[in-house]
Image: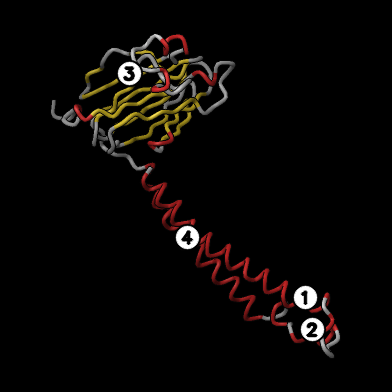
Amino acid sequence: MEGIIYLHNYVMFYLIIIFFFVLSLLVLIYIEFYLPFHFPKDLITLDKRQFFLRNSKFTHWTSLELLWTFFPSLILLSIAFPSFSLLYAMDEVVIPSVTLKVVGHQWYWSYDWTFQNETFPEFDSFMLSESELLSLNFPFHYYPRLLETDNILVFPLNQVVRIIVTADDVLHSWAVPALGLKIDCVPGRLNQVHVKPIRIGFYYGQCSELCGVNHGQMPIQVAVDPMLISFEDD
């Protein structure tokens, strides 16, 4: 996710430069072509033919045409190389500390942890309704509506987690935007992604694939726990 944010800021730098460059050209064209013909006193003795010949560099200038082909090509290359390296890093196979299997159902999630060839009991995660949120000890506004779950998924801090996803019935999508995760859950197929949480806190997501009438009631709640920092050694 840090790489995605860095690439976004990097591309925005070029977009801002291009925006102001194109804006300045539009203003220049407005001043050079629009104003003289709407205010004849600025033309003095120039007729339209002389005027366009004088400004032919804006319409028939070979050097300018070469420049606006060459420089955009350089900009595209400067954007392409960081994006390619980021795509490679996102698909790179990393040796994980722990493996999580995610199964999408209509309409809840099932989680199954595996650590050092030892499988832990599978558990389901359902969305908490508003009445269930009101029954909790903390004030209601402490909990995000439609995002709180009965069983929270806990990730270890600073450890690589391999996530294998699939679906039991229809297409789902397991997505936690703050962690840079979004992967399709396809019935009969296993997809894989990895993540290494580096900040403590709660992270929320939802199913990002239209999967039925209760599609909006499949939240994902992830807690990064510093107490599991030595998870790999225990």
Residue 112 is marked as: 3
Q: Say which residue appears at 38% left-offset and 42% top-offset.
A: 1
Q: Are marks 4 and 3 in contact (CB under 8 Å)?
A: no
The C terminus appears in which quarter of the rendering?
top left
Inter-mark Cα distance, 1 to 4: 32 Å
Q: Nearer the viewer, mark 2 or mark 3?
A: 2
Residue placed under numbered mark 1 in the picture: 35
> Is label 2 in contact with label 1 (beta carbons under 8 Å)?
yes
Dot 1: what SS?
Answer: helix
Q: How far apart, in angstroms, are the residues tagged by discs 4 and 3?
A: 42 Å
Asked where in the image residue 59 lies, by quadrant, the reply is bottom right
Q: Amino acid at mark 4?
A: Phe
Viewer-side label of 4, 3? 4
Residue type beneath disc 2: Asp
Give residue 115's quadrant in the image.
top left
x 41%, y 24%: residue:
220
Q: CA distance from mark 2 to mark 3?
A: 77 Å
Residue 13 - label: 4
Within 10 Å of disc 1 (Cα), the crowding (few <14, some 14-19, many 20+) is few
Count neighbours of disc 2 (C-alpha within 10 A) and say few if under 14, some if 14 to 19, many if 20 or more: few
Residue designated by label 2: 42
Q: Is residue 167 above or below residue 193?
A: above
Q: Mark 1 to mark 3: distance in Å?
A: 70 Å
Q: Is residue 39 above or below residue 121?
A: below
Q: Could you give the CA–CA distance between mark 2 and mark 1, rounded to whole angstroms? A: 8 Å
